Amino acid sequence: MASMLNGLLVAVLLLNLFALGTSRIRALINAAGLQGIALGLMPLLVHGHANLLSIVVALATIVLKGAIIPQVLLKALRDARIKREVEPIIGFMPSMLLGAVGTAASIALAAKLPPLQARVQPLIVPAAFSTVFTGFLLLTTRIKAITQAIGYLVLENGIFIFGLLLLDAMPFLVELGVLLDVFVGVFVISIIIHHINREFASLDTRHLSSLKE
């Protein structure tokens, strides 16, 4: 179980770097979907056994993060008729380097935190910090609204990973409530993307500065 969980956490870290380095938005959506599937499997592995709560959370996460939300974003992508993020504020290679530095810093920071229980995998906290940082980079350095929406989703993935440490203490409805909030947030963002594209024939969020009273 521990080796499988570590493998999923490493996969999440690699997907973070891939997300920062790719210009193809469809590939970015697919990477976020794969992250969602990996996150859905983690509640089943984090404590070495599966109970009803972890199974329900896992299924809900896989369905929402791995299937429904990526399909919503892919539909928004098709409607917008775009393929690439072409003018990021920070280039793709520098973004990858920042992501690698952020991952190393996350590992160093996690090592300085108070020791956790022995059964907690040491990669959980670094993976959570690194994923939050990756989502923040996507959210703040990309121009296209749909890419920023994916950044929001990746950032929440990091919060979800950190929440695995509290899976036993967190009420069942809180976990599902977080997932529902993410789904509603992405759904609303997809509507905003549609209206931005219709009004400006572009998903460049810099055009929003022209909306002045």
Image (cartoon, grey):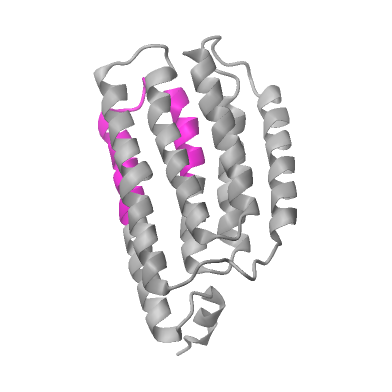
Q: Which of 24 and 190 is in front in this view?
A: 24
* Res. 184 in view: yes
Q: Nearer the viewer, residue 127 or 31?
A: 31
Residue shown at 40%/85% (left/top)? 199
93 lies above or below 171: below
Q: How many marks?
A: 0
Residue 171 location (% of width, % of height): 30, 28
Residue 159 located within the stretch drawn in magenta: yes
Residue farthest toward the top in the current orientation of the protein? 118
Segment colored magenta: 156-184
Chief SS of the magenta region: helix
What quarter of the picture does the C terminus occupy?
Answer: bottom left
Q: Which of 204 and 106 is in front in this view?
A: 204
Q: Which of 106 and 35 is in front in this view?
A: 35
Residue 135 location (% of width, % of height): 55, 50
Residue 69 located within the stretch drawn in magenta: no
Residue shown at 47%/24% (left/top)? 165
Residue farthest toward the bottom in the current orientation of the protein? 213
Residue shown at 48%/71% (left/top)? 82
Q: Name the side, left or right, on which 178 lies relative to 2.
A: left
* Res. 185 in view: no
Quadrant of the rendered image containing residue 57: top left
Residue 182 location (% of width, % of height): 36, 49
138 lies above or below 212: above
Residue shown at 32%/44% (left/top)? 64
Residue 194 location (% of width, % of height): 36, 73
